[in-house]
Image (tube, helix red, strand yellow):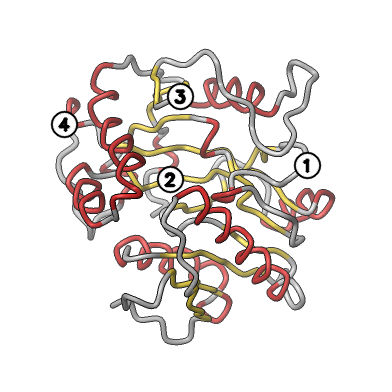
């Protein structure tokens, strides 16, 4: 029987921490959930009893430098976890990894693929509230993927969220250093940080000035989606994006982190993405 764990870090994000814990404890059990609390200047109100928690007291106020430091911390924790577990779901607290409901595989099958490399990238979907298509403020008690049906396929959210070896990670966990980008055909990662405009705006206001530019870019996405076309064929769009960002079609494999997608219908900062409709099969997952 596979022994799996889940690892995240969090700073002042109790809504997403609770969501993360509810999701992964249902897969691996609370006793196999590991949470790094970022900073000793705040306390979470989430019930973390039975959860493995540590506190990172080293703070950098440049976002990229801090993300790089946290990736090093995560690698050390990964090494400890993998002494007694087979693999780890690793990611931010607003990133939830799921098996495609249409896939015939089990986690055992995915692990066999993961073990060969020591990691697998998940197919990333950046979920976003589309205020122009009737998506009102989020009901926090209701199923998220029934309330939010618009997602952006974009290279920055194709991440190595599945780890069976403690390999060196890029800043923000966006890649595995000097390793090819190998994307699972069966496992998706839903990034939920943009599922509600009001929630994102409140988060933006709570961050320090050193993170202002990053969060201003995050908020712009809510306007951008209302001016973009929508690709209703999610599976075909995902196939095209997966092939491009891994370099598989061009015969020039991406190393270290995914290549940029070039042919999207929406621009998010310096990255092109494909705005799509999420299929009904995902609606009840969380």
Query: Could you tell which of marks 1 and 2 lies nearer the N-terminus?
Result: 1
Q: Nearer the viewer, mark 3 or mark 2?
A: 3
As drawn, the label of residue 2 is none
Q: Is residue 171 above or below residue 183?
A: below
- Residue linked to disc 4: 134
Q: Nearer the viewer, residue 73 or 276?
A: 73
Query: Cα distance, mark 4 to mark 2?
Result: 21 Å
Q: What percent of the width, then of the height, locates residue 143?
A: 30, 52
Q: Residues within 10 Å of mark 1 (few under 14, many from 20)?
A: some
Query: Could you tell which of marks 4 and 1 lies nearer the N-terminus?
Result: 4
Q: Nearer the viewer, mark 1 or mark 2?
A: 1
Query: What residue is at 77 percent from the left and 76 percent from the top?
Result: 83
- Looking at the rendered structure, the secondary structure element under dot 1 is loop
Q: Are marks 3 and 2 in contact (CB under 8 Å)?
A: no
Q: Quadrant of residue 68?
A: bottom right
As drawn, the label of residue 191 is 2
Q: Is residue 79 left or right of residue 9?
A: right
As drawn, the label of residue 270 is 3
- Looking at the rendered structure, the secondary structure element under dot 3 is loop
Q: What percent of the width, then of the height, locates residue 46?
A: 32, 76
Query: Cα distance, mark 4 to mark 3?
Result: 28 Å
- Residue linked to disc 1: 179
Query: What residue is at 84 percent from the left and 50 percent from the top?
Result: 116
Q: Are marks 3 and 1 in contact (CB under 8 Å)?
A: no
Q: Is residue 259 left or right of residue 29?
A: right
Query: What residue is at 72 percent from the left and 23 percent from the top?
Result: 247
Query: Could you tell which of marks 4 and 2 lies nearer the N-terminus?
Result: 4
Q: Residues within 10 Å of mark 2 (few under 14, many from 20)?
A: many
């Amino acid at each position: 029987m596979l022994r799996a764990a889940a690892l995240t870090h969090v700073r002042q994000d109790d809504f997403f921490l609770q969501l993360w814990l509810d999701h992964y404890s249902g897969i691996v059990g609370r006793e196999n959930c590991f949470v790094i609390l970022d900073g000793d200047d705040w306390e979470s109100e989430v019930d973390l009893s039975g959860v493995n928690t540590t506190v990172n007291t080293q703070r950098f106020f440049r976002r990229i430098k801090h993300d790089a430091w946290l990736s090093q911390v995560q690698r050390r924790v990964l090494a400890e976890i993998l002494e007694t577990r087979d693999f780890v779901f690793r990611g931010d607290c607003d990133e939830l990894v799921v098996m495609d409901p249409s896939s015939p595989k089990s986690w055992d099958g995915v692990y066999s693929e993961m073990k060969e490399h020591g990691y697998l990238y998940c197919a990333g979907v950046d979920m976003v509230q589309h205020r122009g298509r009737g998506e009102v403020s989020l009901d926090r008690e209701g199923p998220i993927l029934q309330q939010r049906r618009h997602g952006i396929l974009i290279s920055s959210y194709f991440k190595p969220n599945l780890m069976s070896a403690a390999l060196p990670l890029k800043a923000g966990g966006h890649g595995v250093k000097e390793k090819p980008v190998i994307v699972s055909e069966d496992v998706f990662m839903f990034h939920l940080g943009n599922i509600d405009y009001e929630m994102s705006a409140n988060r933006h206001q709570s961050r320090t000035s050193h993170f202002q530019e990053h969060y201003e870019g995050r908020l712009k996405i809510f306007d951008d989606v209302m001016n973009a076309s929508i690709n209703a064929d999610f599976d075909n769009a995902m196939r095209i994006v997966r092939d491009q960002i891994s370099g598989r079609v061009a015969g020039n494999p991406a190393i270290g982190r995914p290549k940029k997608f070039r042919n999207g219908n929406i621009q998010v900062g310096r990255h092109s993405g494909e705005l799509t409709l999420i299929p009904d099969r995902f609606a009840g997952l969380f």
